[in-house]
């Protein structure tokens, strides 16, 4: 059995491609069970975030061949399959392990050095482990990756500065709106991303935060923690004419706001800029909505330019990171090294 990683990320594919591959968190356990039940792998971890969709596997065969079988299993349509042939990565052995180390350390992230990905990896690994989908190969690989990530953060300064999607979104908002003091914000989605973004906005002087979520209890809890206001999910659109900024980060499998609906909402709004920050994958907001006058729509890929402004210093820190010593140690541990 070999240690493999198959998937794509923000570095290889735009959000329009990634959202077609994304797996909603609640469906990950059944996806892992089905994959193993079909005999594609003996062990599996699925990581599906706003910036990457990757399968970490213990499987037999050439990585490209395993990837082809995975696309068959997932029922990938022919047009997307052609895109994946150019953009997806399929790595094995040390290449796969080195990739996992880079991901865990935040070196492969949209915001280089960000810490959220480590938590997301740990959550994905724990979901797989709890379901009985990991064994000797993936357990050793992921435990080593977590240790390497800790070492990278301890020995380098890569995590200093704006190292989160939330902080970059806030910087973007300041640029677009010309400052955040006194602004009103609507957050749609009370998960980790929504909470972190709301807190970062409040730290820059936002006057009020309104929270909407499909689960009312989560909206109430987040609003209380922020000193904000919770509203029913089915009423969030009515807030659009009032606020200056909407942050949308739900796990809905479909768009929750299209251009015609937004156009009708804008008819009840004073003529002033409206910033829409769509951090969801699949995206919550129809890209066509950004063509409306006075509307500034940025999805997760739109944060790249802001993130790049901070990249030069972190690129220097990243060059200090060398994984070879860890790769020498890990393959010697039975179950991690890819075997011919």
Image (cartoon, rainbow, N blue to C red):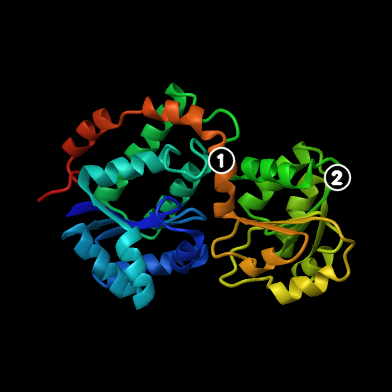
Which quadrant: the N terminus?
bottom left
Q: How many marks?
A: 2
Judged left or right of residue 211, residue 46 is left
The 10 Å Cα crowd at callout 2, few under 14, some 14 to 19, many 20 or more, is some
- Secondary structure type for disc 2: loop
Secondary element type, mark 1 = helix
Q: As drawn, which residue projects farthest toward the top? A: 155
Q: Residue 127 location, x and y as percent? A: 43, 56
Vertical comparison of 161 with 55: above or below: above
**Between disc 1 and disc 2, whose residue precedes?**
2
Query: What residue is at 45 percent from the left and 24 percent from the top?
Result: 156
Residue to which mark 2 is pinned: 207
Image coordinates of residue 60 in percent, x first then y, are 17, 60
Q: Give the residue number, with chain letter if any, for mark 1.
A: 307
Q: Categorize mark 1 by other alpha carbons within 10 Å: few (<14), some (14-19), many (20+).
A: many
Nearest the viewer among 132 and 257 is 257
The residue lying at 17 percent from left, 59 percent from top is 62
Q: Is residue 313 left or right of residue 86?
A: right
Quarter of the view holding residue 44: bottom left
Viewer-closest of 258 and 33? 258
Q: Which mark is residue 55?
A: none
Q: Residue 290, image x and y in percent?
A: 68, 63
């Amino acid at each position: 059995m070999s240690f493999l990683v198959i998937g794509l990320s923000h570095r290889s594919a735009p959000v329009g491609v990634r959202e077609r591959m994304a797996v909603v968190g609640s469906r990950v356990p059944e996806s892992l069970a089905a994959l193993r039940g079909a005999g594609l792998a003996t062990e599996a971890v699925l990581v599906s975030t706003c910036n990457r969709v990757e399968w970490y596997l213990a499987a037999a065969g050439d990585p490209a061949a395993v990837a082809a079988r995975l696309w068959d299993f997932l029922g990938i349509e022919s047009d997307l399959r052609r895109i994946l042939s150019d953009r997806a990565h399929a790595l094995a052995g040390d290449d796969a392990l080195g990739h996992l180390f880079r991901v865990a350390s935040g070196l492969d992230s949209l915001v280089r050095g960000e810490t959220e990905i480590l938590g997301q990896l740990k959550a994905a690994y724990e979901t797989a482990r709890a379901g009985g989908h990991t064994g000797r190969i993936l357990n050793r690989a992921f435990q080593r990756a977590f240790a390497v990530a800790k070492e990278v953060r301890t020995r380098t300064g890569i995590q200093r500065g704006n190292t989160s999607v939330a902080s970059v979104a806030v910087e973007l908002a300041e640029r677009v709106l010309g400052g955040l003091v006194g602004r009103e914000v609507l957050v749609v989605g009370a998960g980790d991303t929504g909470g972190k973004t709301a807190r970062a906005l409040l730290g820059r002087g936002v006057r009020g935060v309104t929270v909407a979520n499909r689960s009312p209890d989560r909206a109430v809890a987040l609003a209380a923690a922020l000193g904000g206001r919770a509203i029913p999910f089915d009423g969030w659109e009515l807030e659009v004419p009032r606020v200056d900024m909407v942050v949308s980060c739900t796990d809905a499998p479909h768009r929750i706001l299209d251009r015609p609906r937004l156009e009708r909402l804008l008819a009840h709004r004073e003529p002033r800029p409206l910033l829409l920050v769509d951090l969801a994958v699949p995206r919550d907001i129809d890209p066509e909505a950004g063509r409306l006058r006075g509307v500034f729509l940025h999805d997760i890929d739109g944060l790249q330019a802001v993130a790049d402004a901070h990249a030069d210093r972190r690129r220097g820190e990243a060059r200090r990171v060398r994984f070879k010593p860890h790769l020498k140690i890990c393959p010697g541990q039975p179950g991690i090294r890819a075997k011919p």
